[in-house]
Image: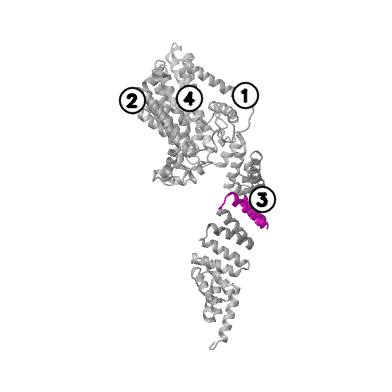
Amino acid sequence: MWIRAGLLVLAGVLVYLNALSGPFTFDDSAAIVFNDQIRRLWPLSDVLSPMRPDQPIAGRPLVSLSFAVNYALGGLSPGGYHLGNIALHILCGLLLFASVRRTLLAPRLGARFAEGSATNLAFVGALIWMVHPLQTETVDYVSARTESMMSLFYLLTMYTSIRAHASSRSAAWLVLSVLCCAMGMGCKEAMATAPLMVLLWDRTFVFESFRDALRARGLFYLGLAATWFGLAALLWFGPRAATIGFSTDVTPWTYLLNQSLLIARYLRLAFWPRLLVFDYGTPQPLTLVQAAPSGAVVVGLLLLTAAALVWRPAIGFLGAWFFVILAPSSSFIPIATEVGAERRMYLPLAAVVFAAVIAGYLCWERWLGADKFHGPSWRASAASAGRIAVVAIVCCALAIGSVRRNAEYQSELTLWRGVLDRWPGPRAHRNVAASLKKINGSPDEILFHMREAVRDDPQARYGLGRELFDQEKLGEAVEELQRAVRERPSDSDAAPARLLIARGLISQGRPAEAAEQLQLILKTTPGDVTALETLTGELLAQGNFDEATVFYLELLKTKPADARIWSNLGLALMKGDHADQAVRALGRAVQLDPRDGKAQGNLASLLLGQRDFAGAAAHAEAAVGLMPRDADAHVLLGLALLGQLKPDEAIGQFRASLDIDPAHQAAREYLARALALKAKQPGG
């Protein structure tokens, strides 16, 4: 048994060795790269506290903790996170091996399978399950750790429950099973099915009826059921109501029709795992006619499972394992953001694999077993070698497929182009465009994919508008963004889109229209300081000083003690020929922040214009002290000194300016004046 366990570990390492260098992708950015909660391990309350509902690991605190451990050990290096996923996958394979072996030796099956046969069948099934290409998404995609961690605790719950039946310390095993179940609830919602599968396992392989099972282990089942309260609390504090449930834009009927297609596809991929898809996009409108063929297959299998649970419980358990674990994500309860995912098959695949392995074993024994060969012993040996060869061929073929699939995860662009080729959709186009942008790909190709995305998903119009803006195609950008906010005015992207529209309009010399956009932003998101600051800065840069002044005054209502805003207001007033008001604004700026050299210089310039040479000298001197390598500051101080009839000191400042910038024409002219003034003075 231990040798087989070692072989499973070796197989897992060899198959996923080339996955270690894969980058973060898709939701990994939100879950890891930009997730501040995993930046520390202590206090634990910070790591485990509820996250924003849009986070991939919201309501999954143990996964968050595992990422925090990864971050503490290796920062944002993807290799450590991939290593964690591989380790989880190997542990799940070992637990599956141990659990199935004990199942085949359970009271209801022990007479059918000898210990050697049970061990070999469990090993072969676990090996195939581990190296199967359908598992690559769960291992290669770091955020899919929610699936593998949940599966680890799911299998631990099953294994410890099974161990308790034949142990003298059954109470300890049962307590451990409840604890594992509770921990699984902190990883993913599908763990809710574990108590049901434990009860069904007991009824199928140990007890004669559910009544007998409840009589013998009722308190244990109650403990397992109590873990549902923990899951309910996590769902309460980390709601996904906007994307999951009956309040989304996707109807249960539409989602159910989509699931019939995808479950049939999962089953096909279990037997022929080619053309795997990383992202199946969002639910699509389907008719009953379109979904009927696959729906008939799924309904037929459900009916067979129900019948088998009555007449062939062991076979029925495999069917129930498949459908019950899939049910939370692949039923009629809509998940608006994700119609399907191959990682959902992580645990359900075990039912398909072991059904095929055990069926193959029974058929082999019936038709080609050793007892069918009479005569020389080499024939029996040949039959045994044949079994090994079949298993080796199947496992090698699957392992090669997994290694090749791992290679596709080495590049975001390769991964998303694969999605586009195999399951085209607007999200695939958007992500191909995003991947191209990261590597400075062709701007025309990026726009092509964004335009293709818009054809099937109007929400992608925001992204198209942003890309056009980045490529400085301002007319098209404004047009696309205006259309986007008309079509989806309440969308979360509407305010950023209006801000880009305003910036585009300013660049086109249309400040009044830009101001209208800003007012709309402030109407929908009052106090949007970022929008005000960005747009006001654009107005100032474009020379629209009066409009900039209005919005700086608006900004000061929100941030009255912000020296930078006062300084910019003073600059706008100064450029707009409102000198007196500019002096007051810049005076407030330097009062709030005396170390703002630019504000000190601007204030000195204004005071010079008002012939307040003493005041100008004081602020110009402050500017020189803060910016000693600024030629203009020295010129301002020189002019203030010159106005005070201090030509010697003024000459020193003008020469200092020329030392910094020998081509400074104004400094050269003022130096000549200062020298002339000095020559006229007595003793000059």
Q: Disc 1 or 2, which lies upstream in sequence?
A: 2
Q: How many marks?
A: 4
User: Label 2 belongs to which residue?
Assistant: 170
Q: Disc 4 or 1, which lies upstream in sequence?
A: 1
Which secondary structure, mark 4?
A: helix
Contact, CB < 8 Å: mark 1 with mark 2? Answer: no
Kind of residue at disc 2: Ser
Left or right: 630, with 67 as reference point: right
Label ID, residue 263 = none
Protein image colouring: one colour
Label ID, residue 321 = 4
In the rendered image, which quarter is residue 262 located in?
A: top right
* Spatial CA span between label 4 and label 1: 24 Å
Which secondary structure, mark 3?
A: helix
Magenta part of the protein: which range?
A: 498-527
User: Label 3 belongs to which residue?
Assistant: 478
The residue sitting at the top extreme is: 374
Contact, CB < 8 Å: mark 2 with mark 3? Answer: no
* Spatial CA span between label 2 and label 3: 69 Å
Kind of residue at disc 1: Ala
Residue 280 visible somewhere in the drawing? yes
Which secondary structure, mark 2?
A: helix
User: Label 1 belongs to which residue?
Assistant: 292
Is 613 above or below relative to 28? below
* Spatial CA span between label 3 and label 1: 45 Å
